[in-house]
Image (cartoon, rainbow, N blue to C red):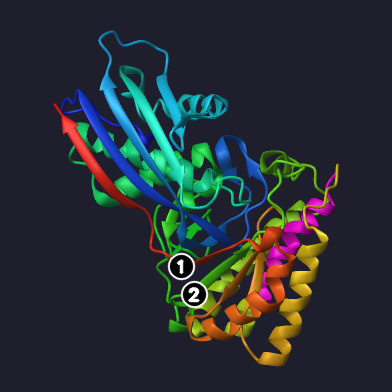
């Protein structure tokens, strides 16, 4: 599909008021995306586990305006309170998406959002938040045009979510989602994420992700700035080629169930992401001393226990500890005993692989 495929035909129905709620999960990339082109196009493909517990629930109330205008008319509430400082980001999102959602200028929107994880917990909410908002908008459009298929619905929601936050396009479906054109994946696209349809060994079913909150403070460099620094990065082309190669390798690993190869690839990807940050100009380091201590302890425990836990990192100091279901008790005991002391006030989130976003409610008044 191409961009014009997401521009709707004339709407068939009329809806005066509606209230729609969706819950969308966060995700954790196994093969990382770092660097992007114009219009939120990724410089390399990525693949992620969809999570379950870390999610954003968003309700959008639509009210048709008596006098349509070219302005976006909306209010945004987070955890029940007005959040004025987030409105410019939503306005920018609406500007990017108005060609694909022509009804936007005809309605007043009340947007109410909340996270299942603590605010300022160090877990990025842009992916789950923008995905939930996009789902509400496309769900409303489906009321205006009921002929929208389920497949088109998911792809358009992912396409729009990407325009708000790149990784948000991987928070529509689950349990594995791939984003970015890749020669080894049929129907892969830079425009939206697709549910991974390759063979997945039972070893990777019901995987756990315990998120260790090492540092809940604001990052010294935003992800947007970090992505931009890849344009002139001395190792960018090698990194992009590596991501393509690693994605191909991961497809074989997922099919074979080789946990040791999975560990090696996922940890290498995490460290490569931070290596790109440390070798850009300007350079920056987002890992903290406790991040490195946790990594070293994971390596030591894995060697002595013969378990298959591993770590991955986002663009920050917090550590995602991944491990299979059948090792849950042993690994979580290790996390409690040896890793939580290196978290900020011992804080952590127990999560696991999920299966995508869920619609909560829809109320219409035609």
Q: Do the residues labelled 2 and 1 touch (CB within 8 Å)?
A: yes
The reply to whether the magenta stretch includes residue 58 is no
Query: Residue 166, position in %: x, y?
Result: 55, 45
The reply to whether the magenta stretch includes residue 280 is yes
Mark yes or no: residue 278 visible: yes
**Residue at image point 49% right, 30% down:** 93
Q: Residue 348 versus residue 127: which sits nearer the camera?
A: 348
Q: Residues within 10 Å of mark 2 (few under 14, many from 20)?
A: many
Q: Is mark 2 on a helix, strand or loop?
A: loop
Q: Is mark 1 on a helix, strand or loop?
A: loop
Would you identify the image quadrant in which residue 246 lies? bottom right
Most extreme residue toward the front, as rendered? 345
Magenta span:
264-281
Q: Residue 344 versus residue 23: which sits nearer the camera?
A: 344
**Residue at image point 76% right, 52% down:** 236
**Residue at image point 34% right, 32% down:** 7
Mark yes or no: residue 182 visible: no
User: Is the N terminus in the top left, top right, bottom left or bottom right quadrant?
Assistant: top left
Would you identify the image quadrant in which residue 133 lies? top left
- Where does label 2 land, which residue? 207
Query: Residue 162, position in %: x, y?
Result: 49, 42
**Tag of residue 100:** none
Query: Residue 108, position in %: x, y?
Result: 33, 20
**Residue at image point 42% right, 13% down:** 71
* Horizontal side, residue 289 vs residue 298: left or right: right
Would you identify the image quadrant in which residue 232 lies? top right
Most extreme residue toward the top, as rendered? 67
- Where does label 1 land, which residue? 353
């Amino acid at each position: 599909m191409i961009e014009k495929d997401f521009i709707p035909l004339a709407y068939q129905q009329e809806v005066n008021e509606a209230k729609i709620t969706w819950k969308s999960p966060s995700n954790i990339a196994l093969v990382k995306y770092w660097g992007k082109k114009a219009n939120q196009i990724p410089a390399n493909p990525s693949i992620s586990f969809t999570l379950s517990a870390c999610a954003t629930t968003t309700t959008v109330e639509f009210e048709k305006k008596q006098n349509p205008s070219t302005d976006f008319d909306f209010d945004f509430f987070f955890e029940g309170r007005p959040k004025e400082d987030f409105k410019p980001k939503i306005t920018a999102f609406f500007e990017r998406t108005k060609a694909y959602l022509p009804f936007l200028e005809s309605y007043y929107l009340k947007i109410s959002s909340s996270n299942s994880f603590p605010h300022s917990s160090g877990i990025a909410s842009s992916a789950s938040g923008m995905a939930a908002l996009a789902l509400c908008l496309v769900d409303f459009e489906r009321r205006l045009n009921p002929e929208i298929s389920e497949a088109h619905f998911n792809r358009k929601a992912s396409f729009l979510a990407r325009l708000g936050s790149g990784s948000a396009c991987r928070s529509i479906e689950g349990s594995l989602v791939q984003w970015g054109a890749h020669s080894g994946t049929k129907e892969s696209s830079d425009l939206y994420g697709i549910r991974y349809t390759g063979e997945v060994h039972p070893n990777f079913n019901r995987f756990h992700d315990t998120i260790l909150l090492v540092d809940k403070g604001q990052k010294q460099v935003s992800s947007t700035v970090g992505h931009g620094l890849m344009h002139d990065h001395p190792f960018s082309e090698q990194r992009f080629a590596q991501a393509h190669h690693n994605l191909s390798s991961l497809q074989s690993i997922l099919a074979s169930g080789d946990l040791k190869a999975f560990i090696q690839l996922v940890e290498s990807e995490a460290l490569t992401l931070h290596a790109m940050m440390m070798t850009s100009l300007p350079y920056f380091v987002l890992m903290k001393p406790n991040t490195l201590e946790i990594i070293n302890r994971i390596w030591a425990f894995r060697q002595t226990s013969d378990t298959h836990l591993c770590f991955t990192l986002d663009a920050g100091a917090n550590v995602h500890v991944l491990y299979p279901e059948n090792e849950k008790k042993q690994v979580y005991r290790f996390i409690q005993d040896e890793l939580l002391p290196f978290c900020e006030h011992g804080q952590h989130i127990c999560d696991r692989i999920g299966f995508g976003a869920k619609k909560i409610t829809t109320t219409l008044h035609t």
